[in-house]
Image (cartoon, grey):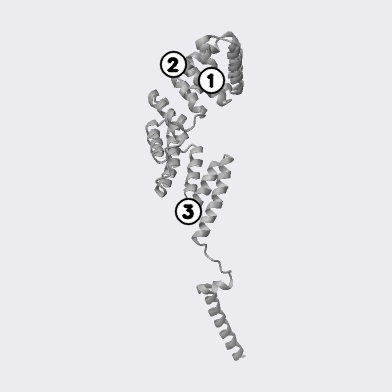
Amino acid sequence: MKMMKKASKIFKCLLGVSLIKIFFVPNSSIAFFPRINEPNQQEFESTSRQIGKTALQLIQFGEYKEAIKILKLALRLNPTEETLWTALADAQFKSKDSNNALLSLDKVLVINPKNASIYFAKGSIYMNSKNLENAILMLNQGLLLDNKNETGYFQLGNAYIMLKDYKKALNTYNKVTKLNPNFWQVINNQGLILYEINKKEEAHSKFKLAAKLSNNAEPRLAFAISSYSMKGISIETLNIAKNALIDNPKYADIEYQSEQLWGRKLQHSAQLFFKTKEMKKVVREAREKTK
């Protein structure tokens, strides 16, 4: 009996030692958990790109906050991936967080200081916040790196229009038309400037050309307004104006015209045209659609 008790004590002692080894000796955990290989940098980068693709889909669906969350996760895995920082900036800007969007774009420039598209993107953000001096600075920096970028020159010309520096705006737009003679938005904006500096016939020609190149409502309506201001009402002018306002009724609103860089003189001519008995009903219906 004593021998059995002694054996029992020895067994309990050995069992205790074995349990201590199991739970407190690190290597013993292998017996309970399968061995997991730690991912290497290449796997981190691959995973981050997959997360980035998901984020881009979220941005397309307007889920900007969710996109920002997972992009930040992706950047923890791969902090030197330019496309992830660019996507993050896009989501931040679209969620109306321009300051952080600019900071994210700055991260790209640390990685790649010669990425012209980032300077253009920063210029657009500054323009959106009406910080025109910084916008011009960024756009010019981008154009130093990419001097054949049509959109960069177009945005720069727009910034000069906003500053009412029409001479610089026209010179900048001329650089675009040399690269692409069919850039209708530039031709239209040349017309906007020419109208403001009392060159109505030249402006009228620009609007006409822009309307030929594009079926957009703006050059067609501007063409009709400039035609009215020089020659008065005609059936052709009325039909062009009416169809343009049907396509985009926002142009009946003076604030929207300002957003599209229309100057005071073209706006004034538009108001006179819209008050004619032939246009009143069309303009009224257009304004009702935008309420």
- Please state the total of marks drawn on the protein image: 3
Which one is in front in this view, the residue at disc 3 or the one at disc 2? 2
Q: Position of residue 252 (x, y in %)?
A: 55, 19
Element class at badge 2: loop
Task: State the residue at coordinates (53%, 52%).
Answer: 49
* Distance between the alpha carbons at the discs numbered 1 and 2: 14 Å
Tag 1 near tag 2, CB within 8 Å: no
109, 215: nearer the viewer: 215
Sequence-earlier tag: 1 or 2? 2
Q: Quadrant of residue 249?
A: top right
Q: Is residue 238 visible?
A: yes
Which one is in front in this view, the residue at disc 1 or the one at disc 3? 1
Tell me, for residue 199, which label it has, or none. Answer: 2
Q: Position of residue 259 (x, y in %)?
A: 48, 25
Amino acid type of the residue tagged 1 in the rendering? Lys
Tell me, for residue 208, which label it has, or none. Answer: 1
Sequence-earlier tag: 1 or 3? 3
284, 81: nearer the viewer: 81
Element class at badge 1: helix
Tell me, for residue 76, which label it has, or none. Answer: 3
Please give left or right for residue 39 compared with residue 146 in the image. Answer: right
Amino acid type of the residue tagged 2 in the rendering? Lys
Please give left or right for residue 289 compared with residue 40 in the image. Answer: right
Sequence-earlier tag: 3 or 2? 3
Task: Name the quarter where the N terminus is drawn.
Answer: bottom right
Tag 1 near tag 3, CB within 8 Å: no
* Distance between the alpha carbons at the discs numbered 1 and 3: 53 Å
